[in-house]
Image (cartoon, rainbow, N blue to C red):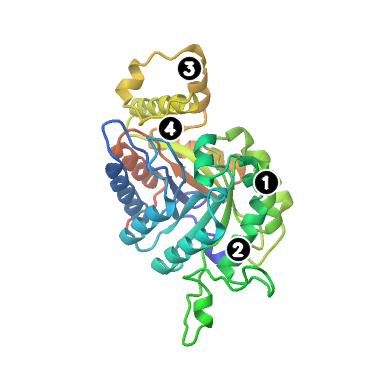
């Protein structure tokens, strides 16, 4: 079972806490999914070379502008192009999958990159209701969310290969996994992917606390719930074999640019993409030029202003100040940055500027 040392990290440079990266594998207008995945490799390499702690990809479906429908496949690709940085899901939406399948996928990833894999789990569908029904082959979507604690327990037992005698699954094994060590001549890795619970409300916060697991909160799209959820997690926390004390990470939208105006342009384009997604018109991330000429309705403008108020953006110094303030307000143990922009070069430059602002190491 994973322990404290596979979860906790040390801050680099002058950063108040460890910094990590959340990648949505965004696809901009005029770009392809191949372009987006190449950018992910570039960002992962940069993150590894500059001392970022982990690199996670999120599960989304039926969104043209987000090419991360298969986290395990993308993580295998990233593992082949990196050597040290932790890689993980931020997260796999467990109700969309059979627990055994996830145990097999992440056991395989662990075999590919021993000691570097995180398994972040969420209970939302990561898409609209119709797509979720197609994924799960049922329209009883609430049932999947309500069953999440049971699915989590089942997945954990597959990862640890410890179903009790008499259980229907006692003779079923997730491979690669611990069963290989018990076979004649078997040798098995001492690592297994640590489980993180992800959330944007209080449900997973409380569950993570009760189970003594690390918790990742989606501040980047549920900022009003961040402090209450983290408080609930800490209040609910019970020490476990995984963690002796709480460990909370928050996802943060942050975009640094050489000029403040460029940061505003890119953030506006990303906000227009969210407007379209929230109004049932998902598409590719528009160019800043398209966003600047788009005629926002009063309601859309209100949404954009609200959305962008939670995006830390501007020059490197402005972003550093915003991240420092957010960490102080929330007490987060780790900040996971997602830089949403149309252009690959802008996203890469953003992480580079943040690394420079905090004096993160080179190489």
**Marks 2 and 4, how far apart in space?**
39 Å
Q: Is mark 2 on a helix, strand or loop?
A: helix
Task: Determine which residue is flagged by label 3.
Answer: 301
Can you tell which mark lies on residue 313? 4
Q: Is mark 3 on a helix, strand or loop?
A: helix
| Circle nearer the N terminus (1, 2) | 1
Q: Which residue is pictured at 32% across the width and 41% down the height?
A: 349
State the image coordinates of residue 247 (x, y, percent, origin top left). 61, 54
Q: Around disc 3, counting alpha carbons within 10 Å, would you say few (fewer than 14), some (14 to 19), or many (20 or more)?
A: some
Task: Determine which residue is flagged by label 2.
Answer: 156
Query: Vertically, is 360 above or below 138?
Result: below
**Marks 3 and 2, how far apart in space?**
44 Å
Q: Around disc 2, counting alpha carbons within 10 Å, would you say few (fewer than 14), some (14 to 19), or many (20 or more)?
A: some
Q: Which of 241 and 297 is in front in this view?
A: 297
Can you tell which mark lies on residue 146? 1
128 relative to 50 in the view: left or right: right
| Circle nearer the N terminus (1, 3) | 1
132 relative to 357 in the view: left or right: right
Q: Around disc 1, counting alpha carbons within 10 Å, would you say few (fewer than 14), some (14 to 19), or many (20 or more)?
A: few
The mark lying in front, picked from 4 and 3, is 3
The mark lying in front, picked from 1 and 3, is 1
């Amino acid at each position: 079972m994973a322990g404290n040392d596979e979860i906790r990290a040390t801050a680099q440079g002058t950063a108040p806490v460890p910094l990590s990266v959340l990648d949505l594998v965004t696809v901009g207008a005029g770009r392809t999914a191949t372009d987006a995945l190449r950018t992910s490799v570039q960002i992962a390499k940069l993150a590894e070379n500059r001392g970022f702690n982990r690199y996670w990809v999120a599960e989304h479906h039926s969104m043209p502008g987000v090419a991360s429908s298969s986290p395990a496949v993308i993580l295998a690709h990233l593992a082949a192009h990196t050597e040290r940085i932790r890689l993980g899901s931020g997260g796999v939406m467990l109700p969309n999958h059979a627990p055994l399948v996830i145990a097999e996928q992440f056991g395989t990833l662990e075999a590919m990159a021993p000691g570097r894999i995180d398994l972040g789990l969420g209970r939302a569908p990561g898409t609209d209701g119709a797509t979720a029904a197609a994924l799960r082959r049922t329209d009883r979507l609430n049932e999947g969310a309500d069953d999440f604690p049971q699915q989590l327990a089942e997945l954990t037992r597959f990862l640890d290969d410890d179903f009790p005698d008499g259980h229907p699954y006692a003779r079923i094994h997730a491979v690669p996994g611990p069963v290989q060590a018990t076979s004649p001549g078997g040798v098995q890795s001492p690592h297994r992917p640590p489980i993180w619970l992800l959330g944007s409300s209080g449900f997973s916060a409380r569950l993570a606390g009760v189970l003594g697991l690390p918790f990742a909160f989606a501040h980047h799209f549920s900022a009003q719930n961040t402090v209450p959820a983290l408080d609930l997690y800490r209040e609910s926390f019970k020490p476990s074999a995984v963690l002796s004390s709480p460990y909370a990470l928050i996802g943060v939208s942050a975009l640094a640019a050489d000029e403040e105006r460029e940061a505003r342009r890119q953030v506006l384009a990303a906000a227009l993409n969210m407007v379209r997604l929230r109004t049932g018109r998902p598409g590719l991330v528009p160019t800043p030029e398209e966003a600047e000429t788009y005629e926002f309705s009063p309601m859309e403008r209100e949404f954009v202003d609200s959305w962008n108020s939670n995006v830390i953006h501007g020059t490197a110094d402005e972003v550093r100040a915003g991240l420092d303030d957010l960490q102080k307000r929330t007490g987060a143990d780790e900040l996971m940055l997602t830089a949403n922009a149309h252009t690959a070069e802008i996203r890469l430059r953003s992480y580079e500027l943040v690394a420079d602002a905090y004096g993160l190491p080179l190489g």
